[in-house]
Amino acid sequence: MQLHLPSQSCLRALLLSSLLFVWGADRSAFRGLSLSQASERGDSGSQRAARESMVREQIAARGVRDTRVLAAMRKVPRHLFVPAEMVPSAYADQPLPIGHGQTISQPYIVGFMTEALELKPRDRVLEIGTGSGYQAAVLAELAAEVFSIEIVEPLGKEVALRLRDLGYSRIKLRIGDGYRGWPEAAPFDAIIVTAAPDHIPPALVDQLAPGGRLVLPVGRFFQQLVRVRRTPGGIKQEELLPVRFVPMVGEAEKPGE
Ligand code: SAH
């Protein structure tokens, strides 16, 4: 009996520590970035240098030329948009997990898609798939108004706090399915979709202003980045690049859509 006592308390301690471990892992995987965390992390000289190399070696070197896009990506502190454990990889040439099975896109793809939108300072832009809010912040550096829709509620709530803390008050956020766009705020000069439907959502084309550009990945496993343009002669479509994005969920997945 006495021999059992230590082993029972041992078991209890083990159980408690594994519970704490799961709780801790869960919290760190899904944690948003609060104001104190954002300001604690700050934007050091080494983060700025890493950003400068990212722009030069991954984005400009691969052909993104728009100087406004390059300046925006030099400015937005990407490391403040990723979970704490991903900060050392924030400026690496890859997408990164942001929790809830979602990812922040590879820096080059953000640069390429942003350039493809051909943004002018007075433009109004819609993004479908807010995710971490990084792409939305880049858009906010380049356009007058940014609207962004995220379907995963906890991600949408985290991103609202993060963008507020970082001072991006011009970005209007909505939690919901972006398949039908944001009709009340339409038309848009540019629309960017950062999750892949297997067809072009008709409502997004309808919400393009004259001259408007829609840039989105289309496909299931093999996806193409497509640009749709509303021209005086009608809707024009071009394929830009093979890509790999998370699928657009919700109404886009319904058969017959
Ligand atoms: N632009 C983001 C990356 C997004 S990853 C960034 O800069 O971090 C794609 C995002 O699209 C995910 O957060 C996913 O939840 C969201 N998404 C998928 N389907 C959606 C839909 N129908 N409407 C809105 N958001 C959607």
Image (cartoon, grey):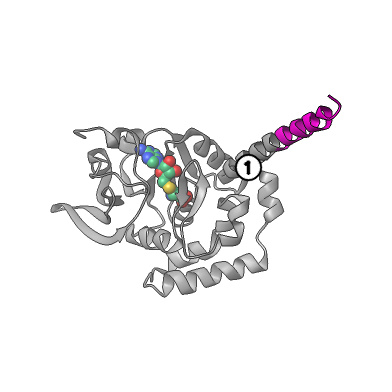
Residue 256: which quarter of the image?
A: top left
Q: Position of residue 217 (x, y in %)?
A: 30, 52
Label 1: how many Cα within 10 Å (few below 14, some 14–19, many 20+):
few
- Is the shortest distance between ligand 1 and the CB of mark 1 under 8 Å? no
Image height check: is 4 above or below 57? above
Q: Position of residue 225 (x, y in %)?
A: 29, 56
- 187 and 177: which is toward the camera: 177
Image quadrant containing the C terminus: top left
- Residue where numbered disc 1 is placed: 25
Q: Is residue 148 visible?
A: no
For the view shown, which residue lies furthest in the left direction? 233
Residue in the picture at 42% in, 75% down: 61
Q: Report the magenta stretch's main SS.
A: helix
Residue in the picture at 59% in, 48% down: 167
Q: Position of residue 218 (x, y in %)?
A: 26, 50
- 108 and 209: which is toward the camera: 108
Position of 203 compared to 124: left or right?
left
Q: Position of residue 174 (x, y in %)?
A: 45, 35
Indicate whether residue 205 is drawn in magenta.
Answer: no
Image height check: is 185 above or below 189? above
Query: Tag 1: residue type?
Result: Ala
Residue in the picture at 26% in, 32% down: 254
Image height check: is 176 above or below 91? above
Image height check: is 38 above or below 152? below
Please state the quadrant of the image where ligand 1 appears: top left
Q: Which residues are magenta?
A: 1-17
Position of 162 compared to 116: left or right?
right
For the view shown, which residue lies furthest in the top direction? 1
Indicate whether residue 12 is drawn in magenta.
Answer: yes
Image quadrant containing the N terminus: top right
Callout 1 secondary element = helix
